[in-house]
Amino acid sequence: MAAARHLRLRQVVTYHRLAADSVAFAQILDDPTARPAVPVRAYHVTGARHGNTSLPAVLRTITSSPPQGLTVFSTAIRRAALTDVPADAVMVAQPLLSIATARQAITAARNNSSNPLTVLAPVALPADPQTMPVYSAVAAVAYAAQAIRGIDGRLDAALDHCLARHAAGWPAGLPATMRLLLPTERDSDQLRGRIAGLILQQTATPWSTRYAALTVFHTQHGHTRIPAGHRPAGADLAGWVGKQQQLLDTGRQPAGKAAALRLVGIVPSTATAGTCARELTACRAYAGTHGHLRPPGPATVAGIRVDTWLRECRRQLQTTTLPGAIGQALETIDAGWAAGASRDAVLDTACRFYQLHGHLRVPDGTTIDGVDLSAALAQLRREREGGTLAASEIAVWDALLLDWGPPGRAPRPGAVTFRTIGTVA
C-alpha cells in the first residue's frame, strides 16, 4: 500500500499462486480495520465467464460506480491473464508456477496499458532490525526481475552491468528503474546494499556471470586480452570473449549486451568512425579538457571508458587491424595519440615502481617484466629537457604527480603514492 501511495497507482492486478491466497488477499484489503485510510476496492477475480467474481461482472461494477482511490484485481496465476484490465501496475505477490507464466501476465498488462507499467514485488523484512534478510526474503523480487528480463532488454543490460560492478568490488546497487521502498524506521544503506546484493545474485544469468568475471579481469589488468589458461570458477573466459567478439562482428549481438561490452572496450572489429561515434565524441571531450588522449588511469566520459577504448585502438594499430577511419579521427583529435603506444607498458611499470618505493629514481639496469624502466625514463627525461617530448606526454606524467625528474633529485614536497592517487581517481 505504501508503494501504491508513493507511486500514485490507481489500478493494480495482483497474481497469486493459489486461488485461496487471492481470496484472502482481497478480503484483507476489503477489511476497513486493516486497510489504510485511502479508499481501496479489492476484487477476487476468477476465470469464469459468469458470476459475481467473473471479470466482466467486476468491470461492470466498476463502470457503474467508479472508484475514488485504489482498485485491486486479485487473481490466481492458474487463471487466464487479465488481458482486459487497464492496470497501471502488476504485483507478483509470490514466486509463481514458472517464469514463463509470470512473463505472460506482465506482458498482458503491458500490452493493455497506454502508460509505462509498474511491476511490484514484496520484500519480507526480518522482525529483528539487526537481522539481515536471506534469499527467501527477496524471492518475489528476483522472480519478477527474471520474468522482466525476457521482456525489457534495457533491464537485462542494466542488471548485467550492476552485477559486474558488484563483482568488481563496487557497493551493490540496482538499476535506476528498480526502486526499493523501505519503511522509514528500517531504511539504511546497509540494508539496501544487502537486499540489492541478494537480488543481483538471484537474477544472474550465465551471460551476466561471465560478463562479471570479464569486468573483474578488466578492472585488475586494464584490458580484455584473456590468457588461454585463465578460467575463473572453471569457465573458459577467453573462449567466451571470443564468441562475444564474433557475435559483435557479425551483427548478431543484442544491443544491450553490445553496449555492456563497449564499457570494457570490446567493440566490433569492423568498426568504423560511424559505429564508434560515441567513443570518438568521448575522446574529443576528454582531449578538450586535458589537452591529450593519454589518460593516466581510469577515465570515463559519458559512460565510455576512454582509457580502455584507446588501449584497444593502440593494440589494433600495432597489429594493423585498426580501421583507417578511426585512426584518422583520433589523429585529428590528438596527433600524438598513438606515439605512446609502446609507452603504455612503461607508464604501468613506472606506477608499480612508484607504489613500492615512493619515487622514480630508478637504478641503472632496472628491468621489470621485460621493461627496461631505467632506460625508458632516461629517454623520456632527455626528450623533455630537449623540448622534443610532446605536451600531451608531459601532461600524462604530470597528472600522476610522479617525481620523474633527473635521478638523485629529492622527491618534491607533498608527493603522494600511486595507491592514493588511484583511490582518488
Image (cartoon, helix red, strand yellow):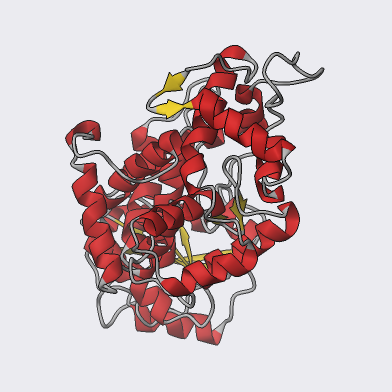
Q: Quadrant of the C terminus?
A: top right
> Who's the residue at 72% across and 52% down the image?
290
Residue 228 image offset from top left, x and y in percent: 19, 39
Q: Nearer the viewer, residue 259 or 354?
A: 354
> Who's the residue at 63% across and 29% down the image?
423
Q: Is residue 280 shown above or below 351?
A: below
Left or right position of 215 against 251: right
Residue 242 image offset from top left, x and y in percent: 23, 54
> Who's the residue at 58% across and 48% down the image?
33
Q: Quadrant of the N terminus?
A: bottom right
* Quarter-of-image position of residue 84: bottom left
Residue 375 visible in this rendered orientation of the protein = yes
> Who's the residue at 65% across and 17% down the image?
359
Q: Is residue 227 shown above or below 48?
A: above
Residue 139 image offset from top left, x and y in percent: 35, 43
Q: Nearer the viewer, residue 289 or 340?
A: 340
Q: Is residue 418 shown above or below 170?
A: above
- Residue that protrudes farthest toward the front in the picture: 386
* Quarter-of-image position of residue 37: bottom right
Residue 399 image offset from top left, x and y in percent: 71, 38
- Residue that protrudes farthest toward the right in the picture: 413
